[in-house]
């Protein structure tokens, strides 16, 4: 009986560690693949320059860009895409993120509504870090 319990405990520990490793490295790989794919597609199609123009023309979004330019990396809640992905998954949830994406793409959500949904779930520090990461992705800095 003791061997069985020890074996069961070891199996549980290994499965837990494996699940955590898959979650940790899986979100990092998924975030990198998605961002690189979308960025490459947008650069090839010329949409990235349209996004930059749209951001610069919108006063709210341009203030976000200015905040991102002025931010110092040492005061950010996270600095990598993987960390941002993990925070979004934990705080917002995968299903809610998909819902936001689908509604925004179909035109059912405005940019203000998307921002409001993120502000409801993220802290000020996390929002600032997210703005900085988006700025770096869009402007290549």
Image (cartoon, helix red, strand yellow):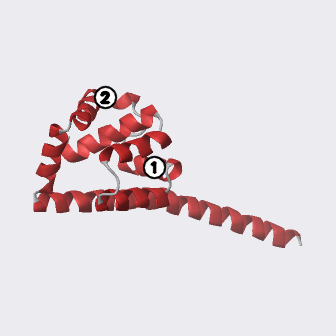
> Which secondary structure, mark 2?
loop
Residue in the image at 32% along x and 28% along y: 72
For the residues labelled 1 and 2, say whether their Cβ atoms are less than 8 Å apart. no
In this orientation, which residue lies closer to the viewer: 118 or 36?
118
* Residue at 43 percent of width and 47 percent of height: 83
Residue 86, given in percent of the width and then of the height, sits at 47, 51
Can you see residue 80? no
Q: Position of residue 87 (x, y in %)?
A: 47, 47
In the picture, residue 8 is in which quadrant? bottom right
**Which quadrant: the C terminus?**
top left
| Residue 94 relative to residue 101: left or right | right
Q: In this view, does 57 lie to the left or right of 98?
A: left
Q: Is residue 137 visible from the viewing direction of this image?
A: yes
Query: On the rendered structure, is 88 left or right of 48?
Result: right
Give the percent coordinates (x, y) of residue 61. Answer: 25, 38
Q: Which of 131 and 57 is in front in this view?
A: 57
What residue would you read off at disc 1?
88
Distance of label 1 from label 2 (alpha carbons): 20 Å
Residue 38: % across, % down: 24, 60
Count neighbours of disc 1 (C-alpha within 10 A) and say few if under 14, some if 14 to 19, many if 20 or more: some
Image height check: is 125 above or below 6?
A: above
Q: Which of 100 and 52 is in front in this view?
A: 100
Residue identified by numbered label 2: 71
Disc 2 crowd, CA 10 A, few/some/many (<14, 14-19, 20+)? some
Occupied quadrant, residue 112: top left
Residue at 51%, 63% in the rendered image: 22
């Amino acid at each position: 009986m003791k061997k069985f319990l020890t074996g069961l405990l070891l199996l549980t520990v290994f499965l837990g560690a494996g699940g955590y490793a898959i979650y940790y490295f899986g979100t990092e790989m998924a975030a990198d693949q998605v961002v690189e794919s979308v960025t490459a597609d947008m650069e090839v199609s010329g949409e990235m320059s349209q996004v930059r123009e749209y951001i610069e023309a919108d006063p709210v979004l341009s203030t976000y860009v200015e905040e991102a330019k002025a931010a110092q990396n040492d005061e950010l809640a996270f600095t990598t895409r993987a960390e941002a992905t993990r925070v979004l998954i934990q705080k917002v949830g995968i299903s809610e993120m998909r819902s936001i994406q689908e509604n925004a793409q179909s035109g059912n959500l405005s940019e203000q509504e998307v921002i409001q949904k993120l502000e409801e779930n993220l802290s000020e520090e996390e929002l600032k870090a997210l703005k900085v990461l988006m700025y770096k992705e869009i402007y290549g800095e």
